[in-house]
Amino acid sequence: MQTNLLILGGTLEATALARAVAEAGLSGTVSFAGRVDRPVRQPLPQRVGGFGGVDGLATYLREAKISHLIDATHPFASVMSHNAVAAANAANVPMVALTRPAWRAHSGDNWTHVPDIPAAVTALDRPACNVLLAVGRMHLAAFAPNPQHRYVLRLVDPPKAPLPLPNTEIIVDRGPFDEASDKALMEAHKIDLVVSKNSGGTGAYAKLAAARALNVPVVMIDRPPQPKRHELATPGEVLDWIHHSTNLGV
């Protein structure tokens, strides 16, 4: 079978992989869930939108004659990751995940770990303060039970509807960010607390380094469980896996 990849994207790692795939002269498509209005331009053909669950993705893999499936989605896109494993098994398509290590606290960090979004909401049941809420726009409504805070939100796209939080400052920007600018942002907005998903990688780490420098505490939301799967850490490792599995006729 001719090499024809499907990359489940939406991360910096997916973009780096797409670039490496294109430079290697391989064919493939990068798929986005459609949650961002202006996805980063890719050096491969793109598709936007869901597949319709496990059965829909398995059908797509067969009909598009996909030779390899690479899950390079966000670490918190666990439903998509579980669907990818199930669909790859159903369609008998080799699959690997391109993952980024989770962030770990360093000396000087003041992190409170919570298991999920509801636990983060509970952690904000406290007197009013200025919160840098870095959880993505999908989860903003969950924090409505704590309207006492002033929330600073950094979003890729401006909100399309009024937010359920009465006191917010919205910054429309796209990473990667750096420590100096995030430190300046947190000082300008007098941030008392950062709430962050443990996304890992380098693109969004700057806010944590800035929080450490300013002695600002962090509520860190741990990653959801991932399915059992083969995981690789770099685009180069993924290319090696593709070549190896192709040569074996997998």
Image: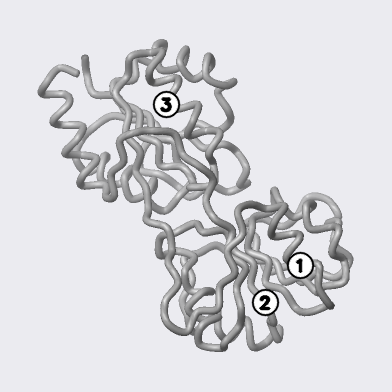
Q: Residue shown at 79%/58% (left/top)?
A: 143
229 above or below 20? above
Q: Quadrant of the C terminus?
A: top left
Instruction: Identify residue type, mark 2.
Output: Leu
- Mark 3 element type: helix
Residue type marked 3? Val
| Callout 1–callout 2 Cβ contact below 8 Å | yes
**What is the spatial separation of the Cα atoms under label 3 and label 1, in whole angstroms?**
35 Å
| First in sequence: mark 1 vs mark 2 | 1
Q: Is residue 148 above or below residue 22?
A: below
- The structure's colour scheme is one colour
Q: Measured from the top left, where is residue 19 in percent x and y?
A: 30, 46
Whole-percent x, y for residue 115 in the image: 60, 53
Image coords of residue 137 (percent x, y): 69, 53
Secondary element at tag 1: loop
Q: Position of residue 109 (x, y in %)?
A: 50, 79
What residue is at 48 percent from the left and 50 percent from the top?
A: 40
Q: Which is nearer the N-term, disc 3 or disc 2?
A: 3
The CA distance from mark 1 to mark 2 is: 9 Å
Mark 2: give few (<14), some (14-19) or many (20+) Cα within 10 Å: many
Note whether 67 is above or below 243 in the view shown.
above
Whole-Å distance between the Cαs marked 3 and 2? 37 Å
The mark found on residue 193 in the picture is 2
The kind of residue tagged 1 is: Leu
Residue at 54% in and 45% down? 224
Judging by the rendered image, the residue that carries numbered circle 1 is 124
Mark 3 in CB contact with mark 2 (< 8 angstroms): no
Using the rendered view, name the quadrant where residue 249 is placed: top left
Quarter of the image for residue 77 reads top right
Q: Which residue position holds label 3?
A: 85
